[in-house]
């Protein structure tokens, strides 16, 4: 008995890798509906899907910002049955808020947050009726921890997490699972798009300190962070594949072990000062961060020291 999987944002990146990974399941346990906003951008997916196309993978149009498009897509699926929904479509935004319009910010919320809400409004009632289903949301470590100059993006992912955490208890009553996948940096078009938009930012509305911080500190280290910590979309696909094949999938799953010490800071100090202090030092006092991290590790009596390494950041 094949399970149906609907994934959004499959023309590139994590969505593409995920669609292909699930469709290529050796046991052919899944029928994947790989959706994208613009079908003319399907070439990369068609190529990667290979012989699964038309068998365990079908491409459909779906724009997460358009309720009609979501309904049309779900209506076209036999019995409207979606066993596993993977909400993946998302966009990034970086830069000082002085330089970003409310319209740009709303567009991020509309895709990353309301996009997921629209999907759930269409699919959740059927899952409740069947008393079965798994909702998987590609969130981010920025769904639990904000990062410099990612104010709006982090807010959109926090919104996603707050929404899912609230819904999760109700979902349990209907035997449904919800899982938030929280990648750190992933090397995809996302990174390139965010970086290029960042470079184009009109910084004339920001004061010189802020403008300098953004272009000479943030953007300069941006690519370096992806190089050092970045995972591939295939990594994220593999992690997500494991989650959807688990008997009792977790509510939250972080994909990047290198990043875990950072998110742990949040839970280690309820006042919130510890992670802020470390982030501040990471950004402004490179050399101090190494000692600060070490002290933190001692504080926690970190046990899994061998599973990651903290390289001293380059000056
Ligand atoms: P990506 O840009 O390659 O993929 C995002 C996809 O969403 C694109 O194919 C895009 O066309 C699609 N999309 C955008 N608006 C849409 C809409 N209205 N309707 C349907 N599709 C739409 O980047 P990615 O890295 O694969 O991102 C996938 C998800 O992973 C996003 O939710 C992103 O926030 C999240 N994420 C990415 C990273 C990273 O560093 N790349 C890290 C953590 C989380």
Image (cartoon, helix red, strand yellow):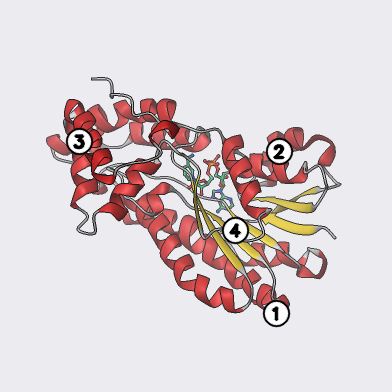
Q: Which residue is mark 4?
A: 249
Q: Which numbered disc flags the more N-terminal residue, 3 or 1?
A: 1
Residues at marks 3 and 2, CA–CA distance in whole angstroms: 44 Å
Q: Earlier in the sequence, mark 2 or mark 4?
A: 2
Q: CA distance from mark 3 to mark 1?
A: 51 Å
Camera-near label (2 vs 1) is 1
Q: Which mark is on residue 275? A: none
Rendered position, 77 above or below 257: below
Q: Are marks 2 and 1 in contact (CB under 8 Å)?
A: no
**Observer-nearest of 100 and 268:** 268
Does 21 sit above or below residue 167? above
Q: Earlier in the sequence, mark 4 or mark 1?
A: 1
**Is the C-beta separation of discs 3 and 2 under 8 Å?**
no
Residue 3 pos. (x, y %): 77, 59
Judging by the rendered image, the residue that carries numbered circle 2 is: 45
Of circles 3 and 2, the one toward us is: 3
- The residue that appears at 82% across and 58% down in the rendered structure is 2
């Amino acid at each position: 008995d094949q399970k149906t999987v609907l994934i959004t944002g499959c023309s590139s990146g994590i969505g593409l890798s995920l669609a292909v990974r699930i469709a290529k399941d050796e046991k052919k346990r899944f029928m994947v509906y790989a959706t994208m906003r613009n079908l003319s951008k399907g070439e990369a997916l068609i190529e990667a899907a290979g012989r699964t196309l038309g068998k365990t993978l079908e491409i459909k149009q779906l724009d997460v910002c358009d309720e009609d498009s979501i309904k049309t897509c779900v209506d076209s699926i036999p019995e409207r049955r979606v066993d596993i929904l993977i909400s993946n479509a998302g966009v990034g935004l970086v830069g000082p808020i002085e330089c970003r319009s409310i319209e740009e910010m709303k567009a991020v919320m509309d895709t990353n947050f309301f996009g997921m809400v629209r999907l759930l409004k269409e699919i959740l009632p059927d899952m409740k009726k069947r008393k079965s289903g798994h909702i998987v949301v590609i969130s981010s470590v920025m769904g639990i921890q904000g990062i410099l100059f990612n104010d709006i993006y982090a807010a959109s992912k926090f919104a996603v997490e707050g929404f899912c955490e609230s819904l999760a208890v109700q979902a349990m009553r209907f035997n449904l699972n919800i899982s938030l996948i929280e990648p750190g940096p992933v090397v995809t078009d996302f990174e390139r798009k965010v970086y290029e938009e960042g470079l184009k930012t009109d910084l004339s509305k920001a004061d010189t300190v802020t403008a300098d911080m953004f272009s000479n500190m943030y953007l300069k280290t941006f690519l370096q962070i992806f190089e050092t910590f970045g995972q591939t979309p295939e990594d994220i696909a593999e992690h997500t594949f494991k989650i959807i094949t688990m008997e009792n999938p977790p509510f939250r799953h972080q994909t990047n072990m290198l990043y875990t010490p950072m998110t742990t800071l949040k839970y280690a100090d309820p006042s919130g000062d510890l992670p802020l202090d470390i982030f501040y030092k990471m950004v402004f006092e490179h050399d101090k961060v190494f000692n600060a991290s070490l002290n933190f590790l001692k504080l926690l009596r970190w046990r899994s020291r061998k599973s990651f390494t903290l390289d001293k950041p380059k000056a």
